[in-house]
Image (tube, grey):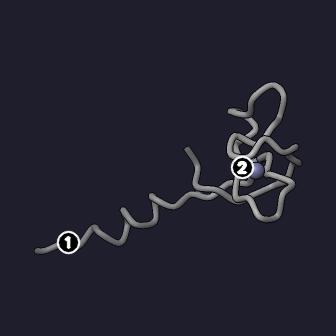
Amino acid sequence: MFFNRKGQEDKLENIMEDVEVYSCSDSACNGWMRKDFASDDLKCPLCGHEMTMEIRELPKI
Ligand SMILES: [Zn+2]
């Protein structure tokens, strides 16, 4: 007998969850970070703008 287990593994890899993140308020900038890893002053790590909180669906870590 031959069992193909690949299908099961694929399902386990992509568990998504809603995560609070801070994203850059500059629409031209892609900077964002997870709330858990945000810096104390909540400035964008890329451009230094203020960041605003939002909910994103991200792979569970
Ligand atoms: Zn930015």
Quadrant hosting residue 25: bottom right
Q: Are marks 2 and 1 in contact (CB under 8 Å)?
A: no
Question: Badge 1 local density, few (<14 within 10 Å), some, or many (20+)?
Answer: few
Judged left or right of residue 33, residue 49 is right
Image x and y of residue 54, in percent: 85, 53
Quadrant in which the C terminus appears: top right
**Closer to the eye: label 2 or 1:** 2
Q: Amino acid at mark 2?
A: Trp
Alpha carbon of mark 2 to alpha carbon of mark 1: how far?
42 Å
Numbered mark located on residue 32 in the image: 2
Vertical relation: 16 (above or below) 45: below
Image x and y of residue 49, in percent: 84, 45
Image x and y of residue 57, in percent: 70, 59
Numbered mark located on residue 3 in the image: 1
Report the number of discs: 2
Vertical relation: 15 (above or below) 22: below
Q: Residue at x 11, y 74 (%)?
A: 1
Q: Residue at x 83, y 35 (%)?
A: 42
Q: Residue at x 37, y 66 (%)?
A: 8
Vertical relation: 50 (above or below) 13: above
